[in-house]
Amino acid sequence: MDFIQEGFVQAYALLVSLDPATYSAIGATIRASTLAMAASLLLGIPLGYVLGYFDFLLKKQLRIIVDTLLSLPTVFIGLVIYALLTRNGPLGEAGLLFTIPGIAIGQAILSLPIIIALTATSVEASDRNLHITLMSLGANRKQIAISTLWEVRLGILAAAVTATGRVLTEVGISLMVGGNIKWHTRTITTAIALETSKGEFGMGIALGLVLLLIALTVNILLAGLRRRI
Amino acid sequence: MYHIQNVDHYYGTKLVLSIEDVSIPEAAIIGLIGPNGSGKSTLLKLMGFLEEPTYGSIFFKGRKTGPFTSDTRFKVTLLPQEPYLMQRNVFENVAYGLKIRGDIKRLKSRVEDALTQVGLTPESFSRRRWSALSGGEAQRVALAARLVLKPEVLLLDEPTANVDTGSARLIRKASLKARDEWGTTLVVATHDWQWLFETCDSVLHLLHGRLFKGGLGCAVYGPWKFGWEGFLQKELEDGQVLVAPTPEEGKQVAILDPSRLKIVLSSKSPLLKWKIGSLNGFVTRLFLESNGQTVQTAIKIAELVVTIRIQREQVELLKLYPGKEVGIQYEPQEIEWL
């Protein structure tokens, strides 16, 4: 069990000594997850609003599909994105395989159903008098959408926290789409997988702790945001 | 201001409102009364253009209109029974309507004026969060958010139902000021007699989604038993029997039209007491109307309450007072069905 203790010491040493490989993995992780979260929030919030607010044909079926996509295995997403981005694949020309944007596409697909489903739930659960109030104060459809989303902002923030956690900690997509290339697409999770396969448990735990530290920082920032809004 | 024509409104397959023809003049104060589920809130939503009637038309200032039209969006506003305050402070709640109109000239002073109008001091309330308000304060903030818009029509759904008497008085005062100062048309769904008989120009009575034109009708629900030929009878809780003609198919609720009821002194004779076309009850309330001549008299007969408008002199003649036993006379064949 010494390797756990060793992990803590190493994690501290890696961060304090500004170890270039560790910081490269931290950078790749943050770049990929930031891109993925930006894309999934931009797409997911409006789609979640539509799914939660309007009644339309096949809405229930669509909701079941979105809920099912919450269970998407990351290796499956990795496989599909790999197949699409590989040189002979339909999107091979884009040259996104083994790149950070490539990983981000996969991670955005992973987090999109979370944002859509939780935003839709928040909108559905909003007070029925909200719509009447906004409309009776003269809001048009666009203003109703924006104001409703603002009213359920804490629910959307919870969706963002959940999705960020999933994106930061996934390994299947980063490994398959990113290829775990040192100094380039190696993220913290793929580095942990590599160190573990080499028997370097202490290093693996150190990187795991670094990842937890990043997650803690993100959540502290979001908690601060939550208090402000 | 409004002309509602042949409106039938359904929720799913259920008909919740059916109005043939009603007009509401400009700057009028109209009371709307009816039991729960009678369609008051639905009518207010249709008049507020928050919903489109399933069938029929609503004309606003002579033009047929509906939700999200420029004709009505900034002119008509509804205060729902349970107002929703947005998760922002009081100032932002009141300013919301002006901001979405892009009308932010003298925003601060206008919001403060509206708060003052509903009896809230801007210094203490402007920065207060929505969650730090009592029920009455929240209702008044919601009203201020409507009054700041200086609407042409203000629709109020039970504005004083869930608030203390002080808040109720302020809400009434502020709403009336809107009518007096800006000519705002007020339509108020309420059970508050002060609103209905002291303030309103006229009262519309809704029963089962239909307007009852004979004043404050009293609905009598089943079960009904077969009586003598062509008539049904309803046994009231105290054993008295109300007799009504057999209704047309599909009609289930009998209406006692107060304009056809007569108040008489209660008979002491047990034989006369149980006479057909006669019921006994006691006065629960007397309310002098704003004209100073007529008195709304509420009489409780077992589980029923009928409200009959009588001349002031008649109150003196019959020596009516709350608690006095009286008789009610009616003609069974004149009872209508809804």
Image (cartoon, coloured by chain):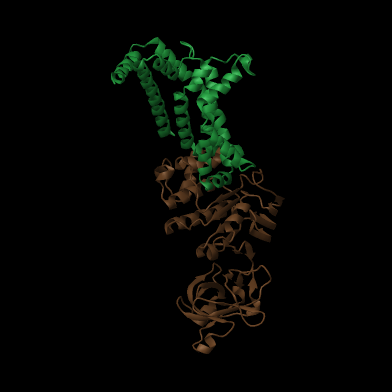
Relative to B203, A210 lies left or right = left
Q: Nearer the viewer, residue B212 or A71?
A: A71
Residue B152 percent location from the top left of the image: 61, 50
Chain letter for the green part: A
Residue B121 percent location from the top left of the image: 42, 46
- Which tint was used for chain B? brown
Q: Quadrant of the N terminus of chain A?
A: top left
In this picture, is B331 found above or below A51? below
Residue in the image at 68% along x and 71% along y? B248
In this picture, is B264 found above or below A63? below
Q: Nearer the viewer, residue A216 or B83?
A: A216
In this picture, is B28 found above or below A66? below
In this picture, is B232 found above or below A92? below
Count of marks placed on residues: 0
Residue B294 percent location from the top left of the image: 56, 72
Q: Quadrant of the C terminus of chain A?
A: top left
Report if residue B253 is visible in the image. Answer: yes
Q: Nearer the viewer, residue A179 or B4?
A: A179
Q: Nearer the viewer, residue B3 or B325?
A: B325
Report if residue B296 is visible in the image. Answer: no
Relative to A23, B274 lies left or right = right
Residue in the image at 57% along x and 15% along y? A96
Residue A65 percent location from the top left of the image: 57, 36
